[in-house]
Image (cartoon, helix red, strand yellow):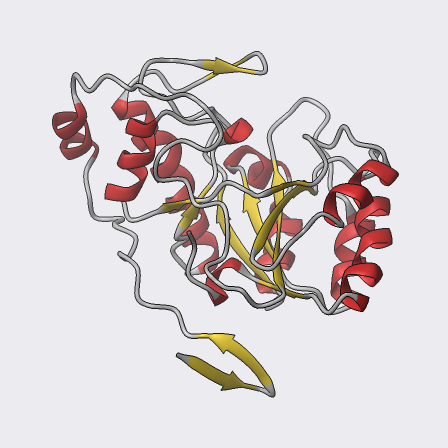
Amino acid sequence: MLVLISGSIFSARSEESPPRPDISRKEIVSRFRGRVPRQWAENVSGVKTRLDTYRKVIALTLDACDSGDDGYDTGLIRYLVRERIPATLFICGRWIDKNPDIFKQLAANRLFEIENHGCRHKPSSVTGQSMYGIKGTANPGEVFDEIGKNGQKIRQLTGRQPKYYRSGTAYYDEVAVEIAGVMGYQVVGFSVLGDKGATYSASQVKAALLTAEPGSIVICHMNHPEKETAEGIIAAVPELKKRGFRFVRLSEYNLK
């Protein structure tokens, strides 16, 4: 079904399972104790990578991670605000702690929706798998802590319970994804690798974004202003608009 809102047509979303801030760590540990994962990747079973639509819309998602050289890409966010480009921001709890005032400003801007990037920016594993030198969560209880503590932080600061989760490094095993689902979260990956952990040059970022198709979910980063992510996005957006694409938040469509 389509709904007309403020002159724009959006796809009406069917109601997903609501987040479960009431579920306990004990319940998760009991339910998932002894489960042995078979998958370890970015796109394991249960990870959503696209919007469920054939319309020419793109979901720009920006991660704010936790690293030693964390920053805030003011230029990128100012551009999005100036051009009225919505985005979904996956923000890590440690980044929030380092940037509380900036976080409040982002959360207050209706262009953006704030989602869960984990408390400590850990890969999501029930066996301690590592990725890019970052040790993952070691067991179901740690998966619960990584997701639940940051969800609680965001809820307390914004009054809104996040409903999407992306792990640190965007790596998962399928058991951890299932835990997130029981907690009421949809685990969100991507279909367009926009800046490869903020390592791409501006031209590479632009080229990546220009591969977007209807329903693409783009992943980029907003915590490395010293890199060229912003330049690449700013170069790509006008061309994507010329091609008839419109930017949306994740919550405006069902995911698949």
Tally the marks.
0
Residue 120 located left or right of residue 57: left
Residue visible at 73% across and 25% down? 69
Residue 18 located left or right of residue 125: left
Coordinates of residue 67 in the picture (x, y in percent)? 64, 25
234 in relation to 70, above or below: below
Coordinates of residue 60 in the picture (x, y in percent)? 63, 53
Front residue of 145/35: it is 35
Residue visible at 25% across and 50% down? 20
Front residue of 38/80: it is 38
65 in relation to 37, above or below: below
Assign the N terminus to one quadrant of the image: bottom left
Front residue of 121/252: it is 252
Write down the quadrant of residue 128 in the picture: top left
Front residue of 123/120: it is 123
Residue visible at 69% across and 31% down? 196
Write down the quadrant of residue 139 in the picture: top left
Residue 26 located left or right of residue 189: left
Residue visible at 81% across and 45% down? 206
Residue 11 located left or right of residue 142: right
Coordinates of residue 19 in the picture (x, y in percent)? 30, 52
